[in-house]
Amino acid sequence: MTAHLKMNERQPAILDDMAQGIIGTPTPRREGPLKVTGQAAYAAEVGDGTEAVGMLVRATIAKGRVTSINEAATLAMPGVLAIITDERMLRNPAQGGADKAPVQGPRDVAYFGQPIALVVAETFEQARHAAQNISVVYETSPDAITDLLDGDAPVERPAAKQIDQGDIENAMNDAAFSIDATYTTPSQNSAAMEPHASLAWWEGENVILHSSLQMLKFNRNELADSLGIDPGNVRVLAPYVGGGFGSKLGLAPEAVAAALAAKELGRPVRVVMTRPQVFETTMRRSATQQRLRLAANEQGELSAIGHDALVSNLPGESFSEPVALATHFLYAGKNRSYSHKIARLNLTCAGSMRAPGEAVGMLALENAMDELAHEAGIDPVELRLRNIPDVHPEDGKRFSSHSLAECLTTGAERFGWDKRNPTPGTVREGEWLIGIGMASAARGNILHEAKARVVLHSDATITVETDMTDIGTGTYTILAQIAGEMLGLSLDRIEVKLGDTDFPPAAGSGGSWGAGSTGSAVFLACQKLRSEIADLLGADQAELTIKDGSVISGNVHHELAQLLTRDLSAEGHIEPGSTSDEVEQATFGAHFAEVAVSAVTGETRVRRMLGVFSAGRILNMQTALSQCHGGMIFGIGSALTEELVHDVRDGHIVNHNLAEYHVPVNLDVPDIEAVFLEERDSWANPMQSKGVGELGISGAGAAITNAIFNATGVRVRDYPATLDKVLKDLPDI
Ligand code: MOS
């Protein structure tokens, strides 16, 4: 039985009438205890002990060719079993959602860190030792380009939306107030706690890959394509994932290498990336240069927005950090211009990292709005309130739901915004200059095709099966809540099985669409099962109350377990339809931050942060808030500390570890509060929920740099706002 829904029309608020009361309820992650007690086995930990161990050998030049590898000497080293140099390994990491990965030419090197071979040995230590000592001869090309801003890189205009509406030059000239400022953001790394790791083995013509990945139905196709085999011969497993943040949307090179080696050796092969390999050989977020132009009248009403971006990627890669995503719809203004260029650089592949586009695009946009507010002498919250569009400012589409104004006003009140002194550099506590700042948050909402199977067993227990992943976001728990709510059973009667391509293909974890898309597939399957139950009673589904294992029809109670004489199974299938095009769907929010900046060292300490968000129905208040907290903490990193430093001579990453690539740690993270406003979005999906995972980071860092300006009068336009950049412009004290 399949229940299929294509989202061509708005959906009624069915879950509002449910009896079980577990949708939305704060519920801890069910796999949490397994993870923290080490019982959830990660990809690097599975296996039966018969595995050989592979270690990637990676290029130490930015551009050129491998001319020879001294394989004989390496093969003679202790424990070494094989050296894999199959050209199928030389691909770039796959981009999320793509089925194919671009191939480098045979033995061509396009970036420092690119995999060129896999050394396989009996033990990890032997493989690492041999890989470190392997002798590779290169022919080095002198024309590697490693710097985004030095102007040497070949530049292309990608397919990203480029707009030229009205006349921005005129609007800038006629404006009462205008801002024309350029911001830069550095390359970043997702820095998930679990490194990329794969165990591969073959059963006849079939390969099984146990890995750490976000979107299995695509990953299966990527591996099939890489190996040149049919996707039907590939099974991918990823039941537990220790964070991804985009870096595991597509296959990283260790997966293909493990599969090739396992085939060649006729034995399972495990390949685990070291932390430096994760930094250099998976994905980075592109560095960006963004010019923002804003023009406004005396009242601060925008007449023009311009956003010109320069980003980078390897030659041939289609992904291009879409920095203007939120700029398109966030603020009104008749004259609009966006240009987007991509520089081809010999640096680690650039790809999606949490909120690709908004995460760095809103750093620039929301700083520029703060600059305009200061210039015009208008309160920054008020400036945003005056510029909320009634409809999409480019194409006139209406918004499916839009709570930005309420987020701004609620946030301002909760945070004590009215106590802000608008004159920078005027609030001081001893050594510390104190400031507060804010920024809007916005992120587009996406529905993705997904399937899931729900089995209602005759003993009134439920099994949910889908190839969806849980990357720490709460999928296991949320899917159980949806099934329990729909079928009136408590969470302890529900098993959720994820992370196996033998299950129905889901949406995967990406683009904040996971819970809404795969959750809707579970919802639809359960709806079908409810109608089956109704049929058993000869009743109408809408009149049933199903709660705590009993079904109430009319005034008669039935025990579900007695009613069911056999297992009932249904598959749910959701597909995006015209509601994705008819209306503009987005989530919104407002960030507020208070910082203290040392007048002596220029060091910034975030003192408190508040985020107020709206994202349709919240399916689990605890996991949703946790996503927001995580996003806001990511915002602290992007504002103050996170930066991949490339050595421009050969493009290698200088700070390729968590000691020197600084993500915020406990002492960097203050009291953080996140709040959701009540909202429903009937255009989004039958649960009326919207994506949450990437909203919290969007705009968060800008609230912090705007607070630094309020504290000090120093405007750092080159992220991150490290102490040296603040200190050099600090007024004498
Ligand atoms: Mo996300 S960057 O689509 O995991």
Image: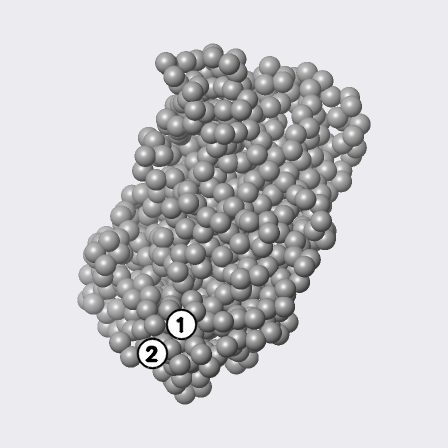
Please name the residue that numbered disc 2 is placed on. 79
In the rendered image, the vertical position of residue 532 relative to residue 201, given as above or below = above
SS assignment at label 2? loop
In the rendered image, the vertical position of residue 133 relative to residue 266, given as above or below = above
The residue that appears at 80% across and 27% down in the rendered structure is: 170
x and y, in percent, of residue 554 in the image: 27, 54
**Residue 70 got which mark?**
none
Closest to the observer, 248 or 492: 248
Determine whether, in the image, residue 35 is placed left or right of residue 657.
Answer: left
The kind of residue tagged 1 is Ala
SS assignment at label 1? helix
The image quadrant that residue 111 belongs to is bottom right
The kind of residue tagged 2 is Gly
Callout 1: CB less than 8 Å from ligand 1:
no
Closest to the observer, 364 or 337: 364
Closest to the observer, 580 or 607: 607
The image quadrant that residue 44 belongs to is bottom left
**Is residue 620 among what the camera can see?**
yes
The residue that appears at 37% across and 26% down in the rendered structure is: 607
**Residue 130 got which mark?**
1
Q: CA distance from mark 1 to mark 2?
A: 9 Å
**Is residue 463 among what the camera can see?**
no
